[in-house]
Image (cartoon, rainbow, N blue to C red):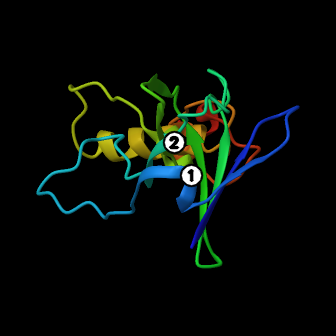
């Protein structure tokens, strides 16, 4: 049995079980290709087809929700929903874990080793560990030093 809890600021939580769904897919794959796009991530994905034949859920009920997934009492993470699609009594919903926030496009003219440092600096910035994307932060761990001090 699984429980899917939808949370949205200012509203009561909605809890769904397998009885409320037409389809449920959970994907937590590892990247296995020969190449990996710079700035790309592997986010866990939920895909749900929610039964809404009785029209119990309004149009925006599941938009911008935080989703908690539990399967057989085991916690499988938190996910963020995309805008749902509605048609013929069904709500189609896709949600991704927080890794998708790190997905970033990088210019194609980056070359190694600059590419590694650019990816690292961008990840540090996106994760909130730095206030700006700065290559200077990569070369020193002493906060009082600046790029000028390094040169």
Q: Are marks 1 and 2 in contact (CB under 8 Å)?
A: yes
Residue 73 horizontal/vertical position (percent): 65, 78
Residue 51 image label: 2
Closer to the chain start, of discs 1 and 2, is: 1
Camera-side residue of 37 and 96: 96
Residue 60 horizontal/vertical position (percent): 65, 22
* Label 1 residue SS: helix
Residue 87 horizontal/vertical position (percent): 42, 23
* Label 2 residue SS: strand
* Residue 32, picture quadrant: bottom left
Camera-side residue of 38 and 59: 59
Q: Which residue is mark 1?
A: 20
- Look at 42% across and 25% down and name the residue there: 88
| Furthest residue toward right | 10
- Image: 5 above or below 128: below
Q: CA distance from mark 1 to mark 2?
A: 6 Å
- Look at 83% across and 34% down and name the residue there: 9
- Look at 28% across and 24% down and name the residue there: 107
User: Quick one: quadrant of the N terminus?
Assistant: bottom right
């Amino acid at each position: 049995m699984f429980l899917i809890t939808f949370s949205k600021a200012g509203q009561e939580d909605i809890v769904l079980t397998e009885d409320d769904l037409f389809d449920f897919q959970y994907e937590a794959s590892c990247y296995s290709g020969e190449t990996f796009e710079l700035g790309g991530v592997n986010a866990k994905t939920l895909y749900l087809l929610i039964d809404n034949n009785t029209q119990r859920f309004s149009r925006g009920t599941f938009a911008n929700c935080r989703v908690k997934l539990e399967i057989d009492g085991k916690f499988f993470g938190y996910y963020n929903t995309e805008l749902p699609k509605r048609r013929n009594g069904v709500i189609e919903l896709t949600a991704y874990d927080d890794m998708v926030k790190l997905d970033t496009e990088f210019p194609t003219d980056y070359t190694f080793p600059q590419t590694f440092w650019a990816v690292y600096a961008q990840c540090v910035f996106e994760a909130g560990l730095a206030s700006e994307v700065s290559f200077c932060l990569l070369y020193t761990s002493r906060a009082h030093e600046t790029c000028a001090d390094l040169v």
